[in-house]
Amino acid sequence: MADQHDENLLPDMLPLYYTRYFPQNIFCRWLSCGNNPKPLSNRELSFTLADDVYLRYLSINDQKEFQTLLQKKCPHKLDIGAVYNTKPSIDRHDAVVLARELVFDIDLTDYDEVRTCCQEAIVCDKCWKFMVVACEIIHTALRDDFGFQNILWVFSGRRGVHCWVSDYEARTLDSPGRAAVADYLCLIMGGENQNKKVHFASDLHSSIWRSLTIIDKYFEEILQDQELISTTEGLKSFLKMIPDETLATQVQENLERMPRSSLERWDTFVTTYNKYCKENINATRKIKYLVEEIKIQYCYPRLDVNVTKGFNHLLKSPFSIHPKTGKVSVVFKPEHAKSFKLEEIPTIYTLLDDSAQDNVQHQSNMRAAVKNFQELVFSLEKAEAMRRKNDANASLLEF
């Protein structure tokens, strides 16, 4: 049972999981902080039941009511929405969104044009490195450029990660504010038919150089793991990213004479590029940052910006079970993403089967994930208490 996923078993297993393992208390405390100053009952929850029955505009008053609802409905999937000015089930057509965590959704399927080890819903340790880079770049930007502190990272349960920013300033951002953050963090532009999706017309912002420093820590590994320019198709795509036809021809001639190693070919490309720039100073304006642009296109986070910009998009709850894999959407620290092992992620089967080979390890990993969640919530509660105190003092000073 622990080794194979069977969605038909979930109706029997989910009540046990929600009772024994889902951190209901800390979950409700997290939502309560995110709702302040409105009551918890104004937060929208959504359940997906068996046979894809979808229930929206649910809400809870407290943990006891949440526990009852979980046991009664036994959701195969639990999603979280925004905070409204009223209970979401009442006058929902006229309800106004008052708060919502600033969220980011990064899915490995959006990397299918560059990853070669897997495609679509399949994920392995090689393509997980794209998520490692994404976590480090996004987390650093949110912390250093925007000053956010309460940043929650969650494995989606299948092929990506979710990021929840719970700081008051983030939760109360309006749509233009969210769009500005999303646009600031989005460097890859264009659809499937566009060959070159990164263009730097002027000197690079310090945040881009910082991102490149992070990418450089993993670039050679990703280059080799994904065989980005070792295959005929990969090389063809690579050459299309070079806008200067003369340079592209030189690179093609040099690389086709070489062994198929992506790392050796990349080094030769950089050498060819540097030589070309020295010999053709007047022609280098549009390719000044070509090396950096290609690195960004290969490795920079691919964000679903609509998730970040909008208020109405619901996102899977931490510790929800992914119905297609049985894996737990565990909370993790971004600095631990590089040691993240997909096969060590707890599943509902291994957690509930004491005889499962991975039961002990998965139990331990589940406890660690809950601890990560607790630390974030404790930090958030402290920040909220301090904010309310400062607001109260400011109100007193006005009189």
Image (cartoon, rainbow, N blue to C red):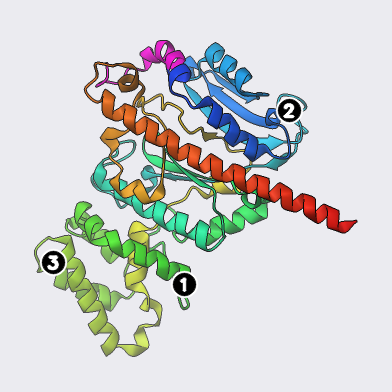
Place of residue 338 in the rendered image (x, y in percent of width and height, measured from the top left): 31, 49
Q: How many marks?
A: 3
Query: SS of the residue at dot 3?
Result: helix
Disc 2 target residue: 87
Q: Residues within 10 Å of mark 1 (few under 14, many from 20)?
A: few
Q: CA distance from mark 2 to mark 3?
A: 64 Å
Query: Residue at label 1?
Result: 206
What percent of the width, then of the height, locates residue 397?
84, 58
Give the distance between the C-alpha atoms of the residues marked 1 and 3, in whole angstroms.
35 Å
Inspect the image, locate mark 2, and give the three-letter code of the amino acid beneath it. Answer: Lys
Q: Residue at x 58, y 44 (%)?
A: 380
- 36 vs 161, left or right, is right
Where is 293 relative to 282, above or below? Answer: above
**Of label 2 and label 3, which has the lower sequence position?**
2
Q: Which residue is most to the right?
A: 399
Question: Which stretch is magenta?
Answer: 1-16
In this rendering, position of residue 225 left or right of residue 33: left
Q: Earlier in the sequence, mark 2 or mark 1?
A: 2
Q: Is residue 309 above or below residue 357?
A: below
